[in-house]
Image (cartoon, grey):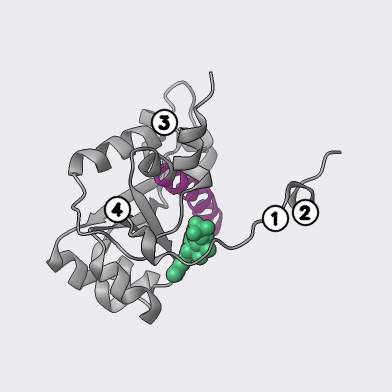
Amino acid sequence: MVVSNEDLDLIFLKARTHSAWLNKPVDDAVLKRAYDLAKMGPTSANMSPMRIVFVKSPAGKERLKPALSAGNLDKTMAAPVTAIFAMDVKFFEQLPKLFPHADAKSWFKDMPPAALETHALRNGSLQAAYFMLAARSLGLDCGPMSGFDNAKVDAEFFAGTTVKSNFLCNLGYGDATKLNPRSPRFEFDEACRFV
Ligand SMILES: Cc1cc2nc3c(=O)[nH]c(=O)nc-3n(C[C@H](O)[C@H](O)[C@H](O)COP(=O)(O)O)c2cc1C
């Protein structure tokens, strides 16, 4: 079983990073469905550290605004939805539920904070990537961004928790007429080798 060429166009070959958005709202049901697809992607010990805040309301956007870099400001304020992809750095507390057939909590719970953050960042970034591909497969466009002040976002949205921001992603229906030409990618032989 393989997906169709049209599906590959939608998810990879013709999908672009968008900065301009059509005036078309995003249904919560589409975001929920994208999450329900993304959550099935693999993570280490099924730790599933990603947490997402979907910033939709003008009041929510105002809370995000002071953390945004100048280049990301206007497009983020204009986007129908901005996802804060975040991660629980104490993900191990959930492992009795998520990995019930082994004592996986004991593998992680005494690790130093930097090691825990590495695990959370690796697996949370994978999950965020799964989410973006899921969103594309449901017809949404994405505009991921790391140009923002993580500490400000953490203070505003995750104070008093063990959750930290990873990166942001505008979501909506992109205006393809505003895209710049696609930048080159490495060919297989430039990035890969067989041994
Ligand atoms: C994690 C991540 C962070 C990014 N940060 C920014 C950013 O802060 N501002 C921005 O304009 N684009 C940002 N981008 C967008 C990339 O430049 C873009 O995805 C890349 O050039 C590929 O573009 P394409 O999908 O249209 O081919 C980011 C992308 C990713 C995945």
Residue 99 percent coordinates (x, y): 44, 28
Mark 2 burial class by Cα count in 10 Å: few <14, some 14-19, many 20+: few
Residue 68 in the image: above or below residue 195 = below
Label 4 vs 1, first from the N-terminus = 4
For disc 3, the marked residue is: 40
What distance separates the C-alpha of mark 4 from that of mark 3?
24 Å
CB under 8 Å between discs 1 and 2: yes
Residue type at mark 2 is: Glu
CB under 8 Å between discs 4 and 2: no
Label 3 vs 1, first from the N-terminus = 3
Residue 165 percent coordinates (x, y): 38, 61
Q: Is residue 125 magenta?
A: yes
- Magenta region: 109-132
Residue type at mark 3 is: Met
What distance separates the C-alpha of mark 1 from that of mark 2?
6 Å
Q: Main secondary structure of the magenta part?
A: helix
